[in-house]
């Protein structure tokens, strides 16, 4: 993310079960998380050709992200970094924004979600 506007593929609301957290009970059982990904991709060719080979297959990216979430993490930051690595594994992705949220954060207050957002060039 260089500050220059880029074409993006946006994937919002990917829900998964993941073992992520600091507390003992979070380390034992998966909990629901929600992920948003914004992939910086040059979409000019795809817009002209209407051909999947000229863009990023977001189905493949979401499959790879789901697979990456099977490995436990203590921190949401770690899970987000893994997801960024997955997205950047496609050479057409020149940058990525990842947001991951716990949908049931383990706090004693009425908190809708707890999450992190990272950017990687």
Image: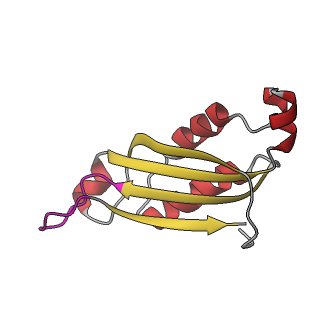
Q: Is residue 30 left or right of residue 81?
A: left
Q: Is residue 25 magenta?
A: no
* Residue drawn at 81 percent across, 36 percent down: 47
* Residue drawn at 61 percent across, 67 percent down: 119
Question: In the figure, 35 relative to 21: above or below?
Answer: above
Q: Is residue 43 left or right of residue 79?
A: right
**First to last magenta residue range:** 102-112
Report whether residue 80 is seen.
yes
Give the main secondary structure, helix, strand or loop, of the magenta stretch. Answer: loop
Question: In the figure, 51 relative to 116: above or below?
Answer: above
Q: Check the image and name the residue furthest to the top.
A: 51
Question: In the figure, 32 relative to 95: above or below?
Answer: above
Q: How many tags in the picture?
A: 0
Question: In the figure, 67 relative to 36: above or below?
Answer: above
* Residue drawn at 76 percent across, 69 percent down: 4
Could you tell me residue 108's position as x and y percent?
12, 67
Report whether residue 70 is seen.
no
Could you tell me residue 64's position as x and y percent?
61, 39
């Amino acid at each position: 993310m260089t500050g220059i506007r880029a074409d993006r593929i946006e994937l919002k609301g990917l829900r998964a079960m993941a073992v992520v957290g600091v507390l003992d009970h979070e380390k034992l059982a998966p909990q629901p998380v929600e992920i948003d990904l914004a992939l910086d991709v040059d979409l000019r060719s795809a817009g002209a050709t209407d051909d999947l080979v000229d863009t990023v297959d977001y189905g493949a990216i979401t499959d790879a992200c789901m697979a990456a979430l099977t490995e436990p993490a203590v921190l949401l930051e770690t899970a987000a970094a893994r997801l960024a690595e997955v997205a950047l594994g496609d050479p057409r992705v020149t940058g990525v924004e990842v947001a991951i949220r716990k949908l049931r954060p383990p706090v004693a207050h009425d908190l809708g979600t707890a999450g992190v957002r990272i950017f990687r060039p």
